[in-house]
Image (cartoon, rainbow, N blue to C red):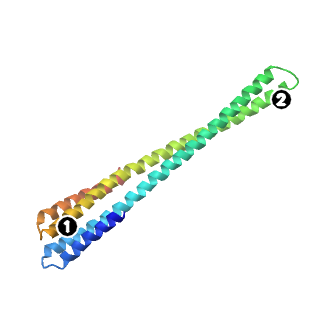
Amino acid sequence: MEEISSEAFEHTEHAQHALHSENAFLAIVAVTIAVLAVVAAGVGSLETIESGGATAAKTQAVLFQNKATDNWNFFQAKSLKKNMYDIAAAQGGPKAADFAAQSQRNEAESQEIQKTARDFEVKSEDALQEGLVHEGRHHHLTIAATFLHIAIAVATIAIITGGRRWPWYASILLGVIGTIIAGATYAI
């Protein structure tokens, strides 16, 4: 992030020098650079937010999946206990009724645990999908920011070359492309 900030200061410095020149066109280029820098900073901030959102959502997905796994392990333990009580009840004897009751209790508890595990799996999948959305936005915003930074650099060429027009036109085109990509990121 510091690299981008210092790069923006360099371009701003070129723009300030252009503002003090006698060439009115260079002042227009300087303003263009300033506008592109502001848009690039905004897109860069959105890019950072989306990156954080992707990381947070994927972390949440992992936590939900861990909870689902814990519940599935608990479900398996309850199933084993139920089966052991079934075997004990089938053997008969004075505690057969107690063993059958324990088997039914473990069956009821395991059904609830199974439902909880499935709920956590759904939450995990939802969080994973949310992370993918954030990640996709991050990639689009990275491309948009790249176009905007290239536009700033190309506009600077117009100043360095003493007012050639083609770099300025190219920078406007690149800036528009970057801005459209950034805007389309949230429309998709």
CA gap between label 2 and label 1 equals: 86 Å
* 132 lies left or right of 171: right
Q: Quadrant of the N terminus?
A: bottom left
Spot occupied by residue 167 in the image (x, y as percentages of width and height): 15, 63
Most extreme residue toward the top, as rendered? Answer: 91
Regarding mark 1 in the picture, which secondary structure is present there? helix
Q: Quadrant of residue 45?
A: bottom left
* 50 lies left or right of 154: right
Q: Nearer the viewer, residue 78 or 14?
A: 14
Q: Nearer the viewer, residue 116 or 170?
A: 170
Decide: few, some or many residues near mark 1? Use Cα within 10 Å; few <14, some 14-19, many ≥20: many
**Which amino acid type corresponds to the residue marked 1 in the rendered image?**
Thr
Spot occupied by residue 133 in the image (x, y as percentages of width and height): 41, 48
Residue 106 versus residue 59 in the image, above or below: above
Q: Which mark is residue 111?
A: none
**In the image, which is nearer the foreground, mark 2 or mark 1?**
1
Regarding mark 2 in the picture, which secondary structure is present there? helix
**Which amino acid type corresponds to the residue marked 2 in the rendered image?**
Asp
Residue found at x 62% / y 40%: 70
Spot occupied by residue 102 in the image (x, y as percentages of width and height): 78, 31
Residue found at x 73% / y 29%: 82
* 145 lies left or right of 101: left
Tag 1 residue: 156
Residue found at x 56% / y 47%: 63
Spot occupied by residue 52 in the image (x, y as percentages of width and height): 45, 56
Most extreme residue toward the right, as rendered? Answer: 94
Q: Which mark is residue 98?
A: 2
Residue 79 seen in the figure: yes
